[in-house]
Image (cartoon, rainbow, N blue to C red):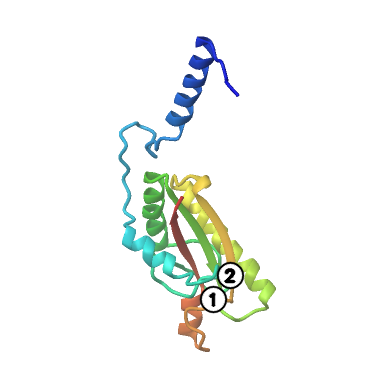
Amino acid sequence: MQLKLNKKQISLILLSLLAVTSCSKNKSASGDGSGSESSDISDQDLALQNSRYGEGNIPKAGEDGPFKDVHFGFNASTVEGSDLSDIESHAKVIQGDSTLKVEVEGHCDKRGTAEYNLALGERRARSVASTLTKFGAPKSQISIVSYGEEIPLDPSDSEDAYAKNRRVHFAVFKK
């Protein structure tokens, strides 16, 4: 079978191919056309974060990661004190690198029912996510999840263990 195309059809095909190839090129995440991005998150930080998940999709407990965990008092979900300045610096990093995706994980100690702790973990995660956005982090780069009491840093029965487990952890990924 022989296909005959006129100049107009050939031009249209070439123009379509040019449009497709130019749309597929990488663009600067900052949108300024410079091709450069600023980020305080290193590849080593992200590799450490990704290793938390091992072979599955439920993370192992750990305090490691590029952002500092936020801790809460018993039955509390309000962000206070020095955690505000930490969250503000986290928000600036997120805002400065549009390729970052941050999952805000809410965690609890083991006191209370599983249902209650899932709800409390969600309130903690929402509180921190809301604070991130108030400091300028785009909502589109933030998601939340509650693990309740299921992933303790310290499974023992002591006030120190409970305090370690009442936290929000940040899982940071590249889009």
- x, y (%) of residue 129? 52, 55
Residue under circle 1? 151
What amino acid type should be assigned to the residue bearing mark 1? Ile
Residues under numbered marks 2 and 1 in contact, where contact means CB atoms less than 8 Å apart: yes
Residue most extreme to the top: 7
Question: Is 115 drawn above or below residue 103 in the view shown?
Answer: below
Residue most extreme to the front: 1
Residue under circle 2? 147
Left of 153 or right of it: where is 115?
right
**Residue density around tag 1, few if under 14, some if 14–19, many if 20 or more, within 10 Å:** some
Under tag 2, what secondary structure? strand
Question: Is 19 drawn above or below residue 37 in the view shown?
Answer: above
Left of 69 or right of it: where is 148?
right
Left of 122 or right of it: where is 61?
left
Q: Residue shown at 46%/77% (left/top)?
A: 164
Question: Is 105 drawn above or below residue 14 in the view shown?
Answer: below
Q: CA distance from mark 2 to mark 1?
A: 7 Å
